[in-house]
Amino acid sequence: MPHTRERTDPRAQQVSPSAGTTRIVFAFVLGLALLAGIAYGQTPPSAPSFTATDIKVLNKLLTFVRPAVKGDGIIAIAYRPGNAASKADAEAIAATIGHGIMTGTAHLRPVPVPANRLMAGEFDIIIPADRAPMQEVAAAWASHHALCVTSQVARVRAGTCTLGIASRQRVTIVLNTKAARRARVDFAAALLLMIEEV
């Protein structure tokens, strides 16, 4: 069954922080701090480019994404066709995610996909693997109105991916607002209080 997204009025997300919002932010930041403490100094050299800690942070961040993902969906792990290292990294990311990410009423399953086949597929989130061709990746997430997430913050600053999560030493979250508008992805006001926007 195809997944559906819950549509909301973007203006409803632009609200002033309330006491409830403050509690959400505090709990979220505390959770990220704990994840960072677990990750610090413990990432093996052979780990995939998008680590288990990055995935845990992503799972928390998805509760702030608007429109919310509902039903069964796909996380496309994009890799460079013909590049064995890129494909291996995509497969390692998919294996780290395992059976998928559960958030709200959504179940998002990871699928490694060569970048030149992204346009033909359906997905809610795209994670570019190491050496993925980012221009093709950017064209795909813009066309599909999907969230692009990467651990390489330089990609976010360049506008070829929307959200950066770096957790190898401490958790850093960077959002490219222009890329988010291009993908038609919004975020709840509570999240915008605690991340870097570029």
Image (cartoon, grey):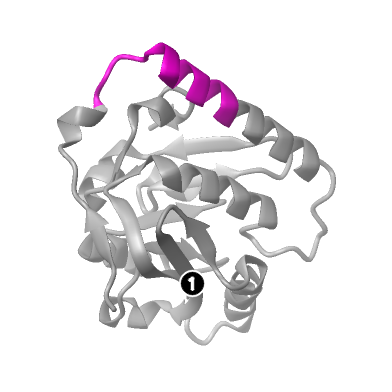
Q: Residue at x 65, y 27 (%)?
A: 30
Label count reads 1
Q: Residue at x 30, y 75 (%)?
A: 122
In which image quadrant can residue 165 be found?
Answer: top right
From the viewer's perspective, is 31 left or right of 79?
right
The chief SS type of the magenta part is helix
- Residue 39 on the magenta segment: no
Amino acid carrying mark 1 in the image: Arg
Q: Residue at x 51, y 72 (%)?
A: 110
Q: Is residue 153 visible?
A: no
**SS category of the residue bearing label 1:** strand
For label 1, the residue is: 109
- Residue 27 on the magenta segment: yes
Q: Is residue 130 above or below residue 120?
A: above
Q: Residues within 10 Å of mark 1 (few under 14, many from 20)?
A: many
In which image quadrant can residue 19 be found?
Answer: top left
Quarter of the image containing the C terminus? top left
